[in-house]
Image (spheres, grey):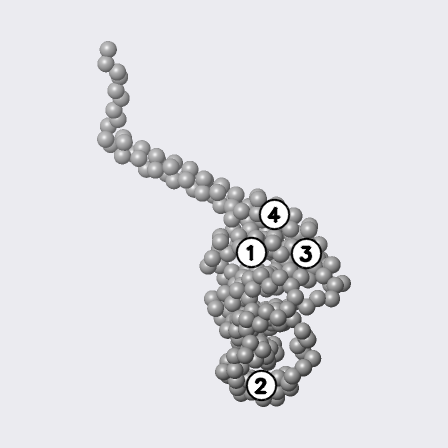
């Protein structure tokens, strides 16, 4: 037996079509309204969690702030407040002298939000975290010269600040980054100079020349430059390289005529062999 087929007259279908479309439209509106309400509720909840974490951050309760920001990111990983939480987490780790965690949080923000208006701050935090690796609670009680420490974190900090200045020259952090670059350049130059002086005290004069040349090439303008040129000149003279010695002395006298005492024999700056 053939299946029963019910067909409505065309006139009846035309009457029912507007009602059907209205039903579909109202259902869509209800769904959209529900989604809008859900989004608004989620936004309000994320804001509340962020403000709670920010309050702890302002009170310098960094661990509590980080905990709150991590909960926020887990619950609402997208949106304005998650982005703010990432940056504030990086800052909190920096203030707790946890450079690796601070850099990881900043890198995550840069990776996820490369065009964000505050991405310059992430680079700034990275630079601060690397530049202050030797500012831990214990280090404050130990007299130290940055020139005697492992230079790699300082080199990375210099790169971080350089990227910030190059990519965001008008950033509100750019001027401070430039000043820190000057400080870091001097510290790195002094480190290499200390290495050259170490070689001098052990009679490795070729190594002295090479290290001094590295300082001149990489850290031109650093405050240790007069001492570097003077040490280089003495190494050339000890090696019997008269022409190189004279060229170095000429370079020294042209740039630092007021520091000629550094070239005197037996000057106390240089360790006696």
Of the two numbered discs 2 and 4 on the same chain, state the one appearing first in sequence.
4
Neighbour tally class for label 4: few under 14, some 14-19, many 20 plus, Cα within 10 Å? many
The residue singled out by tag 2 in the image is 256
Is 39 left or right of 22, judged from the image as shown? right
In the depicted view, which residue is nearer to us: 25 or 233?
A: 233
Q: CA distance from mark 4 to mark 1?
A: 14 Å
Which label lies toward us, 4 or 1?
Answer: 1
Q: Quadrant of the C terminus?
A: bottom right
Provide residue 160's location: percent of width, then percent of height. Answer: 53, 63
Of the two numbered discs 3 and 2 on the same chain, state the one appearing first in sequence.
3
Which label lies toward us, 3 or 2?
Answer: 2
The residue singled out by tag 4 in the image is 70
Q: Which mark is residue 96?
A: 3
Q: Determine contact: label 3, label 2, CB under 8 Å.
A: no
Q: CA distance from mark 3 to mark 2?
A: 43 Å
Residue 116 visible in rendering = yes
Give the answer, above or below, for where 149 lies relative to 200: above
Q: Secondary structure at mark 3?
A: loop
Provide residue 6's location: percent of width, then percent of height. Answer: 27, 21
Of the two numbered discs 4 and 1 on the same chain, state the one appearing first in sequence.
4
Q: Determine contact: label 1, label 3, CB under 8 Å.
A: no
Q: Secondary structure at mark 1?
A: helix
Provide residue 90's location: percent of width, then percent of height. Answer: 60, 56
Which residue is drawn at the image coordinates 55% and 60% (left, top)?
122
Which residue is drawn at the image coordinates 69% and 80% (left, top)?
268
Give the answer, above or below, for where 203 lies relative to 22: below
The residue singled out by tag 1 in the image is 106
Which label lies toward us, 2 or 4?
Answer: 2
Provide residue 167's location: percent of width, then percent of height. Answer: 47, 66
Of the two numbered discs 1 and 3 on the same chain, state the one appearing first in sequence.
3
Q: CA distance from mark 1 to mark 3?
A: 15 Å
């Amino acid at each position: 037996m053939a299946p029963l087929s019910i067909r409505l007259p065309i006139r009846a279908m035309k009457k029912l079509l507007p009602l059907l479309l209205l039903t579909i439209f109202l259902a869509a509106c209800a769904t959209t309204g529900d989604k809008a309400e859900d989004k608004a509720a989620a936004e309000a909840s994320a804001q509340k969690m962020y403000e709670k974490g920010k309050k702890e951050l302002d009170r310098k309760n960094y661990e509590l702030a980080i905990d709150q920001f991590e909960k926020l990111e887990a619950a609402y990983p997208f949106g304005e407040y998650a982005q703010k939480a990432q940056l504030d987490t990086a800052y909190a780790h920096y203030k707790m002298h946890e450079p690796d965690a601070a850099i990881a949080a900043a890198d995550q923000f840069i990776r996820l939000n490369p065009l964000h208006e505050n991405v310059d701050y992430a680079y700034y935090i990275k630079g601060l975290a690397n530049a202050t690796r030797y500012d831990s609670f214990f280090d404050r009680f130990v007299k130290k010269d940055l020139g005697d420490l492992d230079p790699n974190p300082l080199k990375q900090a210099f790169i971080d600040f350089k990227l910030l200045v190059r990519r965001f020259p008008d950033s509100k952090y750019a001027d401070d980054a430039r000043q820190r670059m000057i400080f870091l350049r001097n510290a790195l130059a002094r480190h290499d100079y200390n290495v050259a002086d170490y070689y001098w005290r052990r009679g490795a004069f070729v190594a002295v020349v090479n290290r001094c040349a590295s300082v001149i090439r990489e850290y031109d303008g650093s405050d240790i430059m007069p001492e570097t040129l003077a040490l280089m000149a003495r190494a050339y003279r000890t090696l019997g390289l008269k022409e190189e010695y004279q060229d170095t002395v000429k370079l020294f006298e042209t740039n630092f005529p007021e520091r000629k005492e550094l070239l005197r024999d037996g000057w106390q700056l240089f360790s006696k062999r």
